Image: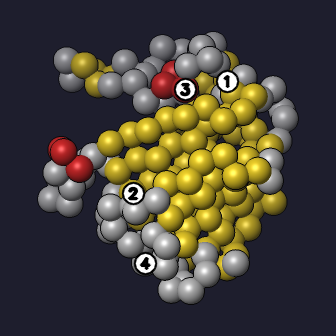
Amino acid sequence: MGTQGFPVPEQGAISFSCKMGAATHNGNPDDFKDGFASFNILDFASGLVFDFIATSTKIGIIYERLLIPGLTAPQEAFTEIVEVGLNRPGQLSACRIDYNFQENRVDYRFNDQKVISRLNLPVRLRNLIMGMGLITLRMIENGRSTSLKGQGGTGLWSDIQVSTI
């Protein structure tokens, strides 16, 4: 995860983009929860997360509000995962996330096409952090992780840019 925050302009939008790809190993590439490479945009003040995610076979987005004790209540937390395209190991796809403060809207663009917008976010965002990672979404059961079962992944990121538009 990055450590530098990017202030959100009150006029126009802030844009985060990269070319991204992934290859998953020894797991189910058709199941995002089994593991993926991610391009993350986060607001730690609200727990809001905007991601592009990739496995060997597909690309998706995550729109999420994390459950963070003392910050968000259980009824405020949610996770939405939507498949937006196909992938092949080693293939790079253009991924872009734009946030407009004035309209309180996030747009996800995949290969230069707007694929999803989310309007009227729970809060207006002031400062965003960008990161990349390899992640699984399997739950902890009986105090043990169910995520790790020998699978792995390779994430590819290039042409990373932050700009105002």
Which residue type does callout 1 highlight? Thr
- Residues at marks 2 and 3 touching, judged by CB atoms closer than 8 Å: no
- Describe the element under mark 3 as helix, strand or loop: helix
Q: Which residue is mark 1?
A: 24
Q: Residue at x 70, y 52 (%)?
A: 114
Secondary element at image label 2: strand
Instruction: Give the residue number, with chain letter if any, for mark 4.
Output: 126
Q: Which mark is residue 130?
A: none
Q: Earlier in the sequence, mark 1 or mark 4?
A: 1
Marks 1 and 4: CB-CB under 8 Å? no
Name the mark nearer the viewer: 2 or 1: 2
The Cα–Cα distance between marks 1 and 4, rounded to whole angstroms, is 34 Å
Q: Quadrant of the C terminus?
A: bottom right
Occupied quadrant, residue 162: bottom right
**Horizontally, is 118 left or right of 67 in the view?**
right
Q: Residues within 10 Å of mark 1 (few under 14, many from 20)?
A: many
Q: Is residue 16 left or right of residue 74?
A: right
Residue depicted at 64% across the width and 19% down the height? 29
Distance CA(mark 2)–CA(mark 4): 12 Å
Residue visible at 18% across and 44% down in the picture: 74
Give amino acid for label 4.
Answer: Arg
Whether residue 49 sits left or right of residue 153 in the image: it is: left
